[in-house]
Amino acid sequence: MLDEALPVRTVRAHCTDKPWMTPNIKALIKARQRAFTKEKTPKYKGLHAKVTKLISNAKATYYKSKAEGNHQSNPAKWYKTIYKLAAATENQQSLSSPDHADLMEIADRLQRIFTKPWLGIQPDLPRLQAVEHLLKDSHPPLPSIGQVKTVLKHLNPRKATGSDNIPAWCLKRYAEELAPVVHDIVVASIVQCKCPTSYKHEIISPIPKIRPPTDLDNDFHQVSVLPQLAKVIEKPQLQLNKSSFKIKTNQHALTSGHSTVSALTSISQNWFDSTDNSSTDRQGVHALFVVFRKAFDLVDHKILLDKLADMNVTRSFWLWIMSFLEGRTQQVNLQGVLSFTASCPAGVPRGSAISPTLFNIHINDMEENVSEQACVNTIKYADDCTMDTSIRLGESSDLQSALDSVQSWAVENKMELNAKKTKDMWINFTEAPPPLPLHIGDAIIERVDNFKLLGTWFQKDLKWNKHVEETTRKAAKNLYCLRECRRANLPVEVGLTTYLTKIRPILEYCSPVWGGLPRYLKDELERVQRRSLRSHIEGTR
């Protein structure tokens, strides 16, 4: 009787269906496709208009039920919903394979690729007795419950969950209740000078560099997912001991008062000053963009700990860092399938709160062997290193000697320069002959006319045409999101938010560096903004 009154209806659903998709819309789409195949043009046009209208209404209904009213009360849910509607979310699937055995094989292969830089490297840590005279023998500073509570409250709830399966949102939501317990864990770790073993296991997510990926060896980069509690332990340690870190002022990554803007400003302003000269004192700038191979993966633990001891840190902190680096392991996670476990005998873990600071310490002395007479300016942003020197008309460049010094430093510190990706550029407004080509060993460094540095394009004539061209091209791709907002009849504020988060940041990135554009380049940027206005805001009136 139940089957007669409420008959079971079978509906074909796909995992890729949008949440606003209905069986009626899917049936009309199928009918539309049949009309197109049979070349029934009038019927196809009618069904096409009907499907478009139904999808638009379905999106509007979905927005009202899922997002309307959540802009202030639940902004995370609101943003997630409008990005779905605007087609602004990317498909993060790296590989697709329905077979579990195939996924396991690919995950193991990616693990071997990611651990290839460590082949032949054996764990090597210094003995405490060898550096104990350099360390402060004082009681370790301990955080208060309030400091731990602050760290918990500032966790990003959308961050991925690590191997301990404790999500960040849980730690953040129950910070008041968990703070005393977590405080005890942090204090015990600091006092015992031990980093918990369970927090030293990384889950690696392979992210495609291009879509679709075609080459496992070159088309993926790795993103480490660490337990959130590991970061909660690291952050107080970093805050309590940062006064001991003597990082040079030319390092702009993750240092107070510095950013990509400060790095690019320091670089470009020196170039403009050097080339802005009179006819009697003409100068050019020879710039070198140094790129390391697998920089974070090849940090030698013994060398890093020796440099940390030279900074006169406390004995307890030095022992804690040694425990942090020792015995680390990782696995590759491919669509829920884990690879075999591999040890990490070198490198600092990506995604860790303290790793960027440790890397800055490791390369802090990179340019110390460069001769002062060479007058080479060095600016660093993590592992991105830019060196330049001003050359008077008729003089030779000192960059080759500086590059040889950096290469010697790399060999001594078990790092490797990437000769293929390292480039140089000759910036000059005269007909003076360019400097001789640079080389690393037998490899000749390619000389380029433009170079992308920290997301900003520089040209050899110090114009911004290339940067504006690439910026407008990238921003124009996201105009599709605004058109989707208009098609879905979403409120104007949704289109405005999409513009402010998906288009405007691209147009304004590092604007203090390239500000003061000529009128014709300003018009190119303004054209994208006017297209944004036409794409949604005017279209909804």
Image (cartoon, rainbow, N blue to C red):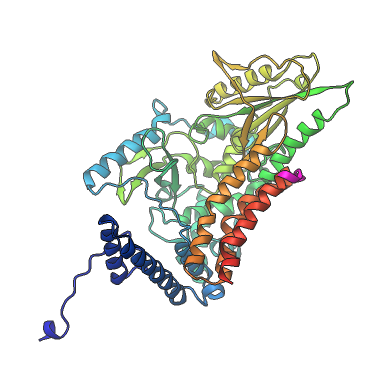
Which of the two residues, 22 or 230, is positioned nearer the viewer here?
Answer: 22
Q: Position of residue 243 (x, y in %)?
A: 68, 46
Q: Please, is residue 72 above or below residue 410 in the view?
A: below
Q: Please, is residue 460 above or below residue 344 in the view?
A: above
Residue at the image position 43 percent from the left and 77 percent from the top: 65
Q: Is residue 516 highlighted in magenta?
A: yes
Q: Please, is residue 34 above or below residue 512 in the view?
A: below
Specify the quadrant of the image occupied by residue 304: top right
Q: Determine if residue 133 is in view.
A: no
Q: Position of residue 257 (x, y in %)?
A: 71, 48
Q: Determine if residue 398 is in view.
A: yes
Is most of the magenta stretch helix, strand or loop? loop
Q: Is residue 418 highlighted in magenta?
A: no
* Quarter containing the N terminus: bottom left
Q: Position of residue 130 (x, y in %)?
A: 56, 30
The magenta-colored residue range is 515-520
* Quarter containing the C terminus: bottom right
Which of the two residues, 351 or 241, is positioned nearer the viewer here?
Answer: 351
Q: Position of residue 211 (x, y in %)?
A: 41, 43
Residue at the image position 60 percent from the left and 42 percent from the top: 470
Q: Please, is residue 271 above or below residue 55 in the view?
A: above
Which of the two residues, 279 or 345, is positioned nearer the viewer here?
Answer: 279
Specify the quadrant of the image occupied by residue 15: bottom left
Which of the two residues, 426 or 197, is positioned nearer the viewer here?
Answer: 426
Residue at the image position 27 percent from the left and 62 percent from the top: 30
Q: Is residue 481 left or right of residue 21?
A: right
